Amino acid sequence: MPGPRKLDPSSSPRALLGAELRHRREQAGLSQTDLGAPLFVSGSFIGQLESGVRRMQMDQAEKFDELLGAGGFFVRNCAALKKSKYPEHFAEAAEAEARAEAIREYAPQLIPGLLQTEAYARAVFREYQPTTVESVIDELVTTRLERGQLLADPTVPQLWVVLDEAVLRRRVGGPEVMAAALRHIAGLARQHRAIIQVLSFSEGGHAAMGGGLKLMAFSDAPPLAYLDSLGSGQLLDDPLRVGKYELTYDLLVASACSPAASLALIESVAEDYVHEVQRF
């Protein structure tokens, strides 16, 4: 099993806090479980803070300063973590996503952010915020496309996505936008950059009808699950709950079309959108 990832303390405030937390904990002769007990969190949670997977909260920083005699170091530096270009409910999940070695996601309604094209992302944000000025939409689109740069690396993260058929059929932005968006996904599948499966309508009910699900695995920290809903989200690290959602994802994969059949369906639907554009 890989050892803890070596963090560069100069790379980010989170890396700095994680490296310092590990250093001071070890200097104090405490295990991760020992340090987590007064905060009512698990040793695994402390490990996720140290590895940079989880974001340190201000109340935790205050407690670490007290327990480790850090003289306010954690409180001072924790303030820098409050700044994020992502919505509050998604900020921690997005930052964890950037460090994940494997991401498995079920998308019930929309193409996942990592797979979106610029035009598709713009259409989504405009639907979410119909009265927002264009400059704000531009910033949101830029941030979303920056997330997609994770896929520029040919190997990490390993990405496996199950798309509900509704994702293909929901005409976000119109047929031209959809044709390009689906061709983009098909291209990633053909380049072997992502495993894509489609959960067809013909399957009927399934294990994740309650909403979106993202599972993230790390080389140096326990896995996380992120549950997505309208304007909110929940990041989970409890092993029992994460294990439950891992089973949910396995059931979705078992019910979905094979990658080859899914690719054929995605390209067929994309071609239908192209023909629709050409007719008008």
Image (cartoon, helix red, strand yellow):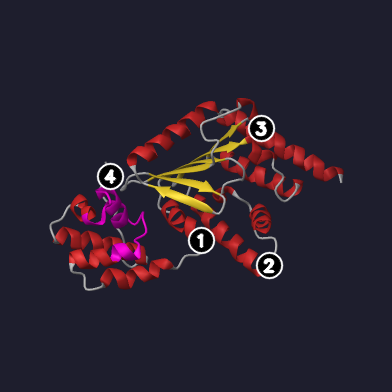
- Badge 1 vs badge 4, beta-carbon distance below 8 Å: no
Q: What whole-number distance in Å separates the C-alpha atoms at marks 2 and 1?
A: 18 Å
- The N terminus lies in quadrant: top left
Name the residue type under label 1: Tyr
Q: Is residue 40 magenta?
A: yes
Mark 3 lies on residue: 265
Q: Which residues are magenta?
A: 38-61
* Distance (Cα) linking label 2 and label 4: 46 Å
Residue at mark 3 to residue at mark 1: CA–CA distance: 33 Å
Indicate the amino acid at tag 2: Glu
Q: Secondary structure at mark 2?
A: helix
Residue 21 has which mark?
Answer: none
**Magenta stretch, overall SS:** helix
The reply to whether the magenta stretch includes residue 273 is no
How many C-alpha atoms fall within 10 Å of the one at disc 2: few (<14), some, or many (≥20)? Answer: few
On the image, numbered disc 1 is attached to which residue? 86
Q: Residues within 10 Å of mark 3 (few under 14, many from 20)?
A: some
Q: CA distance from mark 4 to mark 3?
A: 39 Å
Asked if residue 146 lies left or right of residue 176, the reply is left
Between tags 2 and 4, which lies in front? 2
- The residue where tag 2 is placed is 134
Which residue type does callout 4 highlight?
A: Pro
Report the residue at 77% width, 42% height from top.
Answer: 274
Calculate the distance from the C-alpha at mark 1 to the C-alpha at mark 4: 30 Å
Disc 3 to disc 2, C-alpha distance: 34 Å
Sequence-wise first label, 2 or 4: 4
Q: Quadrant of residue 247?
A: top left
| N-term mark: 1 or 4 | 4
Residue 209 screen position, x and y as percent: 55, 35
Q: Are marks 2 and 1 in contact (CB under 8 Å)?
A: no
* Residue designated by label 4: 2
Q: Residues within 10 Å of mark 4 (few under 14, many from 20)?
A: few
